[in-house]
Image (cartoon, rainbow, N blue to C red):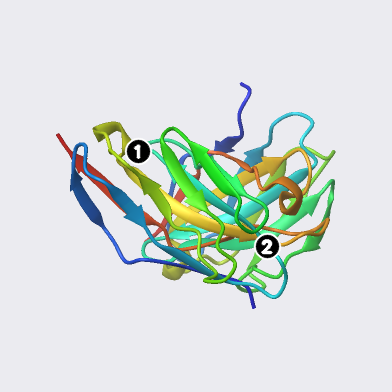
């Protein structure tokens, strides 16, 4: 498809398990962002990729969170030893150039993570 | 640091009512300002933007004016429709190659027929 694709759309896991969330950005978009959307908290920035490198990973909440991007395309967000407070919708967005220049990010529909 | 503050929600209006959603910001530099909208079951999408003071962004009948003196970017629409029911996010970004968007908490708008 032409948009940002995320998988899985829904993930229920047990506390302590690891999860991987995948983002397939729009073809040709060099910038990729991960955000977390929690009830009452708005959108929380996690990490930004320019190509395969991450100039800004300041939003990752702990060392249990990591992300990588390969081939300048697909990105994976990994959460190790999940906790209940990790329950949220994880959003991926991409843009042709870095968001600060134009501000137009294209978002996927998100991956809803529930940690029991 | 940079931050965006939106009015508390949710907001419920009748169709054809006037809408104002307040947004104020704090920024260390000279930001660009945005409104994003999230319709039910869909991803966020850009609604409108303004990149310098006194600019007015507009789209789909919505407008917002970049007010540097009051550090505000309030969203307005003269006559809302049921199809405008969604979550609205105000956001800012600073100039720079590695800049990210900083979002407010969002506000849910419900429009009754």
Does residue B61 show up? yes
Q: Residue at x 30, y 49 (%)?
A: B19
- Chain bearing tag 2 is B
Residue that numbered label 1 is attached to: B40
- Chain bearing tag 1 is B
| A40, above or below A92, in the image | below
Name which of mark 1 and mark 2 comes first in the sequence.
2
Q: Give the left or right position of residue B7, taking residue A70 as reference.
A: left
Q: Give the left or right position of residue B23, taking residue A28 as reference.
A: left
- Quarter containing the C terminus of chain A: bottom left
| B111, above or below A67, in the image | above
Residue that numbered label 2 is attached to: B31
Image marks 1 and 2: residues in contact by CB distance under 8 Å? no
Where disc 2 sits, the SS reads: loop
How crowded pointer 2 is (Cα within 10 Å; few <14, some 14-19, many 20+) is rated as: many
- Quarter containing the N terminus of chain A: top right
């Amino acid at each position: 498809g032409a948009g940002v694709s995320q998988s899985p759309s829904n993930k229920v896991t047990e506390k302590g398990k690891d999860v991987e969330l995948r983002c397939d950005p729009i073809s040709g978009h060099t910038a990729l962002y991960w955000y977390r959307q929690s009830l009452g908290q708005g959108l929380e920035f996690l990490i930004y990729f320019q190509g395969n490198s991450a100039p800004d990973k300041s939003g990752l909440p702990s060392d249990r969170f990591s992300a990588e991007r390969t081939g300048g395309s697909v990105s994976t967000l990994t959460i190790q030893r999940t906790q209940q407070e990790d329950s949220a919708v994880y959003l991926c967005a991409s843009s042709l150039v870095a968001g600060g220049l134009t501000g137009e990010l294209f978002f996927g529909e998100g991956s809803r993570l529930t940690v029991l | 640091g940079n931050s965006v503050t939106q009015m508390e929600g949710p907001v419920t209006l009748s169709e054809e009512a006037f809408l104002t959603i307040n947004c104020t910001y704090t920024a260390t530099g000279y930001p660009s300002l945005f409104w994003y909208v999230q319709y039910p079951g869909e991803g966020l999408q850009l609604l409108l933007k303004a990149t310098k003071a006194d600019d007015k962004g507009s789209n789909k009948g919505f407008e917002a004016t970049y007010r540097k003196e009051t550090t505000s970017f309030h969203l307005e629409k003269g006559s809302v429709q049921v199809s405008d029911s969604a979550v609205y996010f105000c956001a800012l970004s600073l100039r720079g190659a590695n800049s990210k968007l900083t979002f407010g908490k969002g506000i849910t708008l419900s429009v009754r027929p």
